[in-house]
Amino acid sequence: MKALRQPGTLDIMRTEAATLPGDPARPNEDWAATALPASGDGGTLVLLDGVTPPRGGDGCVHTVPWFTARLGGALTELSASRRDLTLSEILSLAIRRTAKLHADTCDLSHVRTPQATVVLARWGAAGVEYLVLSDAVLLLRAPGGGVRAVRDDRLDRVPAEALRSHAAADRLRNREGGFFTAAADPAVARRAVTGTVPAAEVRALAALTDGAGRWVERFGAGDWTDCADVLEREGPAGLLRRVRELEAADAAAGGGRRGKVHDDATAVYVEP
């Protein structure tokens, strides 16, 4: 991959991230990080979107941000330090490590135990490895400008009526024929969408939680290539500002009935 070069300087890697809570009165349940080894050989990206449980409990004494911070921290450390492990193995190990932190105090078998969607990416001279679990998205931009969206579309394939109540959604959560998230079972790592792309085929990459992906998926303001263009020109903060403007206009027009007016929204953009 080609680093961003400024005249008269060394190669510079561009990494930017931005996040906004869906409700300023509630903690943001998204989590994101990038790690750039001191050796300069590649880097890693981690993005999590915590799943908000309905009122009534989830069998855990901890909050969703507690969970995403610990799972995200484990994923960042492992993906940066354990190049001998695949991203699926890293996710499995990170889930196991996080579960161990609260197994003695919480019911980790509860269907709503704290959980999150996951995007992992790790790049180096050889290529870009990726992992996506549930409804976040990873964008891979080619040198020619084309964009590939890597998605886990299992949630999209669940009929909308099957998700209209929490009880119905629980019957499909982490079940065959339903959808999968990172919770307490390390085996879920095998369900993730994974792959590797040669380094020469990736000019930039971006990860978006579904709150940021609304620009494409809910509002149809552009396709994923247009979204990558916005990220390149305006950065993640620019994309999130656009999402909030669309949400506000939609709510004013009565569209807020389609679900949460605002969601936690996070975007990470990297030019390796």
Image (tube, helix red, strand yellow):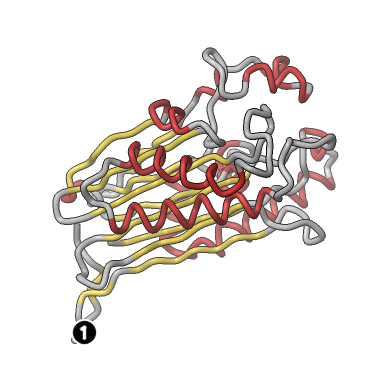
Which residue is labeled 1 in the image? Answer: 9
4 relative to 109 in the view: left or right: left
Query: In this view, which residue lies farthest toward the front?
Result: 104
Q: Is residue 60 above or below residue 269?
A: above
Q: Quadrant of residue 45?
A: bottom left
Query: In this view, which residue lies farthest toward the bottom?
Result: 8
Q: Is residue 272 above or below residue 82?
A: below
Q: Residue at x 26, y 53 (%)?
A: 123
Q: Residue at x 84, y 34 (%)?
A: 56
Q: Is residue 191 above or below residue 204?
A: above
Q: Depth check: 172 or 92 in front?
A: 92
Q: Quadrant of the C terminus?
A: bottom left
Q: Position of residue 117 (x, y in %)?
A: 54, 39
Q: Position of residue 113 (x, y in %)?
A: 66, 36
262 relative to 92 in the view: left or right: right
Q: Residue at x 28, y 35 (%)?
A: 195
Q: Position of residue 99 (x, y in %)?
A: 54, 42
Q: Quadrant of residue 184?
A: top right
220 relative to 125 in the view: left or right: right
Mark 1 neighbour density, 10 Å: few (under 14) some (14–19) many (20 or more): few
**Label total for image:** 1
Q: Position of residue 178 (x, y in %)?
A: 57, 18
Disc 1 residue type?
Answer: Thr
- For mark 1, give the secondary structure: loop
Q: Quadrant of the N terminus?
A: bottom left
Q: Depth check: 205 or 56 in front?
A: 56
